[in-house]
Image: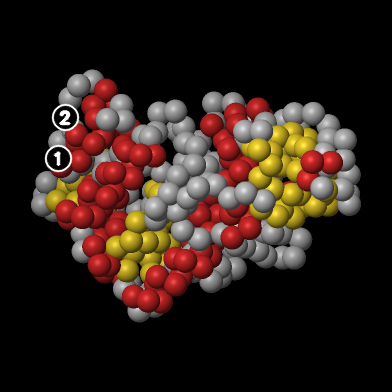
Amino acid sequence: MVETLPQVTIGEDERLDLENLATGAFHPVRGFMTREETLSVAQEMRLPSGAVWTIPILLQLQERPRVGKGDQVVLTHREKPVALLQVEDAYELDLKTLSRQVFGTESEDHPGVKKLLAKGPYALGGRVEVLAWRPRGPLEKTPDEVQALFQQRGWRKVVAFQTRNAPHRAHEYLIRLGLELADGVLVHPILGAKKEDDFPTEVIVKAYQTLIEGFLPGERVVLFGLATPMRYAGPREAVFHALVRKNFGATHFLVGRDHAGAGDFYDPYAAHRIFDQLPPLGIEIVKVKAVFHCPLCGGIASENTCPDHHRERRTSISMTKVRFLLREGKTPPAELVRPELIPILQEGV
């Protein structure tokens, strides 16, 4: 039967997202979004049901589809059938308007906007049925599997830590903060596509494994991965990340400075303020301000813990700075990143 159905070729991003739809990682979203769902999310940060959701989950096409509501379509990836789509809507997107609403800009200098525009102005919406699952790596677990592990370990409070980057000292500070608040911490890096100047996924994972094994209580920290691309949608993506981690069983979610940002497109604390505009999400948001090294405090501090010592003496911590130093052939100081991680990070520059 599959052989007789129309086929639509999808990319890696869509392959990952259809599996997240199927496993419940994107609950309450249950399929690629229809026009009504897309407009509701873009304009109101709500699904038509009223449930909070902030990022459109789209199946975009370059050409107008020759199918419509009620049709079944085979989604193929690398010339292999991977899923069935029950078409509920076939429609055209206003990509410029959608970019402004979701990313706050039309600029193609924004990596999320660039990708959205490149994928095409048409879309199919509907429920998906997976025909062939990807081989999963050891860090890829479904929400049910992760929740079962938490239950097995007796973790009632779980702090989720989102990252798209290898760990520097500020990341470590946030993880330790999570350990003070909860029974355990879920370190949950993005495994899907990222910007070209971000570290490769394998380097990120290896660095976190080294950090956890050598410097954190391994029995209270778990490292799994979230197989979805980065959107770089700043505050809206912070909400998306929180909702997804709730589906994995987290009770708390860390949001730091410029969460999911890119360049200077977002105010550093826009991702804090957006949660004030929304009803309770069923997961507690732990907002952390800028983290830096302060010699007068004697180590890593934040805007909430440093008594406003001489700001010019603070060492700001960012992976952009770490990558720059590594590409210049220089060794980042221990105030920025643990020396034990430097050889791993050098593999990714």
Residue lying furthest top: 328
Q: Residue at x 24, y 55 (%)?
A: 212
Residue 265 can be seen, yes or no = yes
Q: Quadrant of the C terminus?
A: top left
119 lies left or right of 68? left
Q: Secondary structure at mark 2?
A: loop
Looking at the image, tell me whether mark 2 or mark 1 is earlier in sequence order. Answer: 2
The residue carrying mark 2 is 331
Residue 33 can be seen, yes or no = no
Q: Residues within 10 Å of mark 2 (few under 14, many from 20)?
A: some
310 lies left or right of 234? left
Determine contact: label 2, label 1, CB under 8 Å: yes
Q: Nearer the viewer, residue 292 or 243?
A: 243
62 lies left or right of 254? right
Question: Could you tell me residue 52's position as x and y percent?
Answer: 64, 62
Q: Does residue 55 sit above or below 123 in this rendering?
A: below
Question: Could you tell me residue 215's position as x and y percent?
Answer: 17, 55
Q: Residue at x 75, y 37 (%)?
A: 8
Task: Give the label on residue 339, or none.
Answer: 1
Question: Could you tell me residue 38's position as x and y percent?
Answer: 73, 49
> The residue under label 2 is which amino acid type?
Thr
Colour convention: secondary structure
Task: Give the label on residue 301, or none.
Answer: none
Q: Residue at x 66, y 33 (%)?
A: 79
Question: Could you tell me residue 65's position as x and y percent?
Answer: 83, 35
Q: Residues within 10 Å of mark 1 (few under 14, many from 20)?
A: few
Q: Does residue 71 sit above or below 321 in this rendering?
A: below
Q: Does residue 99 sit above or below 141 in this rendering?
A: above
Q: Secondary structure at mark 1?
A: helix
152 lies left or right of 291? right
> The residue under label 1 is which amino acid type?
Pro
